[in-house]
Image (cartoon, rainbow, N blue to C red):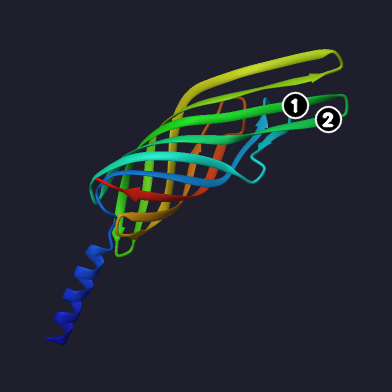
Amino acid sequence: MRRLLLAGVVVLAGSAAHAADGVYVGAGIGKSDLNNVFGDGFNLDSNGVSWKALVGFRPIDFFAVEANYLDLGNQTKNFGIGTQSANAKAFAAYAMGILPLPYLDFFAKLGAARWQLDGSISGSGQFFAFDNHGTQLAYGSGVQANWGSFSARFEYDGFQIRNTDGLSMYSVDAIWTFL
């Protein structure tokens, strides 16, 4: 009888600790890596900080849809006789599969990212500017800790950007569910 009572308490406590279903908003900070821009060895380093804003809808415990705006950083580097600069950002939309456990959710997400990479290379009287954009398959995964309508998550986002070795971003996000 004690075991049955204990099992019931654990199940009820665990179900109360899941993230709230509904509409949510959030923001995060993290580190993004965008390497080998135009094959010249120039890496866009976010100087330690990239950021994202997100909005989503979780109608049931196992599924959500989410949209992210990602500021992937900007950087300028001097090289001998010139300067290189680049700036990257993206908008991504995902479908998310979620494994809800007591106090934690593990998730994987798949969708599309509309990205923009622009910049310039100048030196020796030469100037080259680029404005590159596209839409690519986007993916990610992570873990989310839940405390009622507030959640915190650690996640990875990734997608390919033309003329680079691809993008990866790790972030820590704070999320609030309000409907």
Q: Is residue 170 above or below residue 128?
A: below
Q: Is residue 86 above or below residue 103?
A: above
Q: Which residue is mark 2?
A: 79
Tell me the crowding category of disc 2: few under 14, some 14 to 19, or many 20 or more residues within 10 angstroms, Cα based. few
Residue at point 30% right, 62% down?
101
Residue appearing at x 48%, y 46% in the figure: 28
Quadrant assignment for the N terminus: bottom left
Residue 72, percent from left and from top: 57, 36
The amino acid type of the residue labelled 1 equals Gln
Question: Where residue 25 sits in the image (x, y, percent)?
Answer: 36, 43
Front-most of 19 and 106?
A: 19
Q: Earlier in the sequence, mark 1 or mark 2?
A: 2
Q: Quadrant of residue 113?
A: top left
Kindly indicate whether the residue at mark 2 contacts the one at mark 1 (C-beta within 8 angstroms): yes
> Quick check: 165 left or right of 104?
right
The quadrant where residue 102 appears: bottom left
The residue at the far bottom in this view is 2
In the picture, the disc for residue 100 is none
Q: Is disc 1 placed on a helix, strand or loop?
A: strand
Helix or strand or loop: what does disc 2 sit on?
Answer: strand
Badge number at residue 84: 1
